[in-house]
Image (cartoon, grey):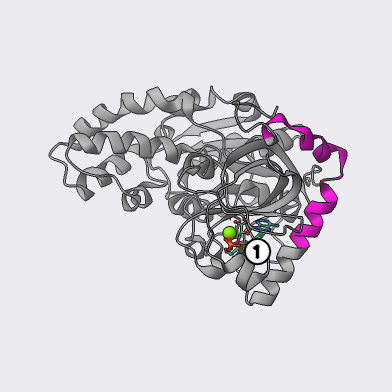
């Protein structure tokens, strides 16, 4: 849920957290811990994941050993999992908007620091797989370079010192509670980008809470604005998915009057974990019918308090009948807004219609229109790529 005070304090320097803020480290952490805990006859679950976000590796390992009652010393556990993590760093993906943010701030000459609780050697290894990142930071600082990691303010104060910046002129962007506390304790402005969904309400000490880096508006903090928004839409690196339409909840068509062709979230769980919730648009192909403009929500649909993340494309076309079971292919080319919780059904419906109008219009722009011819929208048999 996006929330913000009217105007932030003006800043000149930015300090970014790495894991969970710029990198989707969670996916890998979960993979490794799943494998390790099985060896102890235990099962890794979401509860564990929530307990370790933002902790230093030692604190995180201690929490796991304690929570799951593992019969080993913390040091033993760490030496067991460390090489498993190192093997996975090349597989960590940048979070949506991370590359865009780094490139933007660099091109505008905004001094940028990276401050992570991970040891500096791990940070360097992780960012070595991300093109252009290392050169973009004037300061990179690890948890092993200060006495106390986050939530102590030390790491952020040291980052500011190395940039020759006054802490009050720094903006911290963080996903975890310890990081937010550290930033506030350092006297800095803090934007929270929670990596755990549905917990945004917890992050009240942050100066602003945003859903993803795509929703950051640097001008609120006196920094240069992004220039890539066009007519209420943000072009994104296109991605595509496809699968049979599964039966929905009947709420879209029956309550909202807006049918949505649900796809199996289980089947696309990898893709869904890579893309933050929000309203996106693009082109939809039903190989036996044609290609249509499309606007969709990805997420929990807070108005209905879903427990599962869903993909619900609304094809901007009047169909005579349902097409359950048919193969639906999507190319997602742009982003409109974060998912929101609406106070009334009417306000939700009117906002969805506005999303529809925005998508309808934007898809005629040359930057989006060309994807209508993407081969992946038509061919249902061959494995293909959109770009
Ligand atoms: P919900 O909208 O909650 O998913 P239903 O599953 O009953 O409710 O209705 C959605 C179904 O309606 C889709 O599975 C699809 O077959 C059909 N449908 C008809 N028109 C459209 C449209 N314009 N966009 C998406 N789906 C549509
Ligand atoms: N549901 C929400 O609770 N919040 C939203 O911001 C939201 N945005 C949507 C945008 C579009 C374009 C579409 C098609 C749906 C959106 N929904 C949203 C989901 C809608 O409530 C969904 O169709 C219902 O959950 C019915 O299954
Ligand atoms: Mg549906």
x, y percent for residue 326 = 59, 46
Determine the image quadrant of residue 131: top right
> Which region shows up in magenta?
354-376
Looking at the rendering, the quadrant in which ligand 1 lies is bottom right
Residue 213 in view (yes/no): yes
Residue 152 lies in the magenta-colored region:
no
Would residue 216 appear left or right of 69 to someone viewing this image?
right
Point 56% across, 66% down: residue: 250
In the image, residue 185 sits, relative to residue 282, either above or below, namely below
Along the line of sight, which residue is nearer the eye, 86 or 110? 86
Along the line of sight, which residue is nearer the eye, 158 or 124? 124
Point 24% across, 44% down: residue: 43
Which residue is denoted by mark 1 in the rendering?
Answer: 4
Would residue 23 appear left or right of 220 to someone viewing this image?
left
Residue 117 in view (yes/no): no
Point 22% across, 50% down: residue: 67
In the image, residue 269 sits, relative to residue 346, either above or below, namely above
Would residue 143 appear left or right of 15 to someone viewing this image?
left
x, y percent for residue 194 = 51, 53
x, y percent for residue 303 = 57, 69
């Amino acid at each position: 849920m996006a929330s913000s005070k009217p105007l932030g304090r003006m800043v000149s320097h930015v300090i970014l957290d790495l894991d969970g803020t710029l990198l989707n480290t969670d996916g890998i952490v979960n993979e490794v811990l799943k494998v390790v805990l099985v060896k102890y006859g235990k099962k890794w679950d979401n509860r564990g994941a929530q307990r370790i976000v933002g902790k230093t590796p030692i604190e995180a390992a201690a929490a796991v050993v304690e929570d799951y009652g593992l019969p080993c010393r913390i040091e033993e556990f760490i030496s067991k999992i460390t090489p498993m993590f190192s093997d996975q760093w090349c597989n960590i993906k940048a979070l949506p908007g991370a590359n865009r943010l780094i490139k933007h701030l660099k091109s505008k000459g905004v001094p940028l620091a990276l401050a992570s609780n991970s040891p500096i050697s791990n940070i360097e290894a992780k960012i070595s797989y991300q093109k252009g990142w290392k050169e973009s930071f004037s300061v990179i600082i690890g948890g092993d370079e200060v006495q106390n990691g986050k939530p102590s303010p030390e790491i952020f104060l040291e980052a500011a010192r190395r940039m020759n910046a006054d802490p009050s002129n720094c903006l911290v962007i963080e996903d975890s509670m310890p990081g937010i506390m550290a930033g506030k304790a350092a006297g800095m402005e803090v934007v929270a980008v929670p990596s755990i969904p549905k917990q945004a309400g917890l992050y009240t000490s942050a100066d602003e809470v945003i859903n993803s880096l795509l929703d950051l508006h640097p001008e609120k903090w006196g920094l240069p604005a992004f220039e890539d928004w066009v007519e209420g839409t943000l072009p994104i690196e296109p991605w595509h998915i496809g699968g049979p339409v599964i039966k929905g909840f009947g709420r879209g068509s029956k309550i909202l009057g807006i049918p949505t062709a649900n796809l199996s979230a289980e089947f696309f769980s990898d893709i869904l974990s890579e893309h933050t919730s929000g309203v996106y648009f693009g082109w939809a192909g039903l190989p036996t019918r044609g290609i249509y403009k499309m606007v969709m929500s990805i997420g929990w649909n807070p108005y209905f308090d879903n427990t599962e993340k869903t993909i619900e494309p609304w094809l901007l076309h009047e169909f005579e009948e349902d097409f359950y079971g048919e193969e639906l292919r999507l190319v997602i080319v742009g982003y409109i807004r974060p998912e929101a919780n609406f106070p009334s059904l009417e306000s939700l419906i009117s906002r969805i219609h506005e999303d529809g109008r925005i998508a309808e219009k934007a898809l005629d722009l040359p930057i989006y229109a060309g994807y209508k011819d993407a081969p992946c929208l038509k061919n249902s048999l061959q494995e293909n790529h959109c770009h």
